[in-house]
């Protein structure tokens, strides 16, 4: 079982990513889609509500037994913190305040980062732009697992372990694959985050801090919502490198399941991506899609033909426009 998956390789391609051409075709046929671009006026209020909900949860955690701290970290905090990372994903595309207020978006992402427990938003922004510009690009798109990950995590047990520790691979991989200089915004992000962490610790002790960080790690590991990591770009069908999911979990994940639509139009906020699919239905209804992120996780673990190795890997040149 392990050998079959271990022999699998990246599918090397030398063509432009499909989203660039589809974007041109859709905009030529449906220019009204341009009206969907721009900030989401509700995002900042939703995110603010989520931040204060987690601060209230921290207060409630202060005297709970440790078993209940971890229970709520997985069942409640993990859902909110994972959803918050997807809000940060949307904010990285300037949809909270618009492209003309880029700095406000960066600062607001730092605020949204607070429940995550660890500084994340500024580094995510730095690398996520490359994910869009060089989708699948060798050494440029750090969402692609390393050769070691693909070679080693090739059996059901090892793939299960990889899912559990996925937050660590996702967070540390860029430092190995494509290290970049630390920016002032990353320093600011860290100072604000650790200052708030220390304040929470001073007020209510260790349990709220553990609740936040454990919620982030558990919620982005072996968790139903984390199925979107696998569903988005792993090669379930040869020749297809991006997939969408239109199920109910989109309601709590800022429509990240509309992933083909997002890559086609990254400047359109998640709340309007269903409108893109509705307007240009003939472009998306015929493309492969996932019915369930939980089913995606199951298939990933137990299907020999799916592993961290199975991604499109593209030869890209450093350019200012999408590869």
Image (spheres, grey):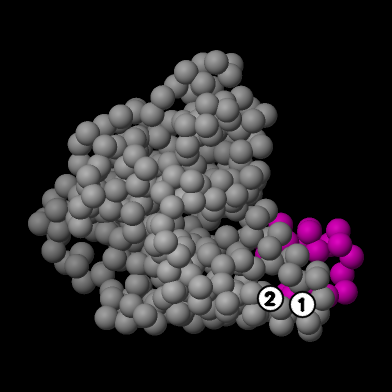
Q: Which mark is residue 21?
A: none
Q: In percent of the image, x 15 and y 58: which residue is there?
A: 27
Q: In this orientation, which residue lies closer to the viewer: 205 or 173? A: 173
Work out which quarter of the rendered image holds the N terminus and state it: top right
Q: Would you place residue 270 above or below residue 114 in this image? A: above
Residue 215 visible in rendering: yes
**Side (left or right) of 60 relative to 257:** right
Q: In this orientation, which residue lies closer to the viewer: 302 or 200? A: 200
**Range shown magenta:** 56-78
Q: Which mark is residue 197?
A: 2
Q: Give the dominant element type of the magenta stretch: helix, strand or loop.
A: helix
Q: Which mark is residue 201?
A: 1
Q: Could you tell me residue 138's position as x and y percent?
A: 34, 39
Q: Could you tell me residue 183's position as x and y percent?
A: 43, 69
Q: Residue furthest front?
A: 181
Q: Are marks 1 and 2 in contact (CB under 8 Å)?
A: yes
Bin the neighbour count of mark 2 within 10 Å (Cα to Cα): few under 14, some 14-19, many 20 and up: many
Distance between mark 1 and mark 2 Cα atoms: 6 Å
Q: Would you place residue 202 above or below residue 285 in this image? A: below
- The part of the image, by quadrant, that contains residue 34 is bottom left
Bin the neighbour count of mark 1 within 10 Å (Cα to Cα): few under 14, some 14-19, many 20 and up: some
């Amino acid at each position: 079982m392990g050998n079959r998956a271990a022999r699998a390789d990246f599918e090397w391609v030398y063509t432009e990513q499909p989203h660039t051409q589809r974007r041109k075709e859709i905009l030529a046929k449906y220019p009204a889609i341009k009206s969907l671009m721009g900030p989401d006026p509700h995002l900042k209020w939703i995110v603010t509500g989520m931040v204060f909900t987690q601060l209230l949860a921290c207060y409630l955690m202060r005297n709970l037994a440790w078993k209940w701290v971890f229970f709520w970290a997985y069942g409640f905090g993990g859902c909110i913190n994972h959803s918050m990372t997807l809000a940060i994903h949307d904010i990285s595309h300037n949809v909270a305040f618009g492209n003309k207020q880029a700095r406000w978006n960066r600062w607001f992402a730092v605020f949204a980062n607070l429940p995550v427990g660890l500084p994340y938003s500024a580094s995510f922004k730095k690398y996520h732009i490359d994910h869009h510009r060089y989708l699948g690009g060798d050494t440029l798109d750090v969402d692609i697992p390393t050769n070691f990950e693909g070679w080693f995590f090739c059996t059901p047990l090892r793939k299960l372990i990889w899912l559990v520790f996925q937050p660590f691979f996702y967070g540390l991989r860029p430092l190995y694959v494509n290290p970049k200089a630390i920016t002032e915004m990353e320093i600011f992000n860290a100072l604000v985050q650790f200052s708030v962490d220390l304040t929470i610790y001073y007020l209510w002790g260790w349990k709220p801090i553990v609740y936040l960080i454990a919620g982030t790690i558990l919620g982005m590991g072996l968790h139903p919502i984390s199925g979107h990591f696998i569903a988005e770009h792993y090669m379930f069908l040869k020749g297809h490198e991006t997939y969408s999911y239109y199920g109910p979990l989109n309601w709590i994940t800022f429509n990240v399941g509309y992933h083909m639509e997002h890559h086609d139009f990254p400047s359109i906020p998640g709340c309007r991506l269903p409108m893109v699919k509705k307007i240009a239905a003939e472009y998306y209804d015929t493309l492969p899609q996932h019915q369930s992120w939980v089913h995606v996780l199951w298939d990933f673990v137990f299907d020999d033909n799916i592993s961290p190795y199975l991604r499109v890997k593209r030869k890209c040149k450093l350019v200012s426009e999408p590869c």
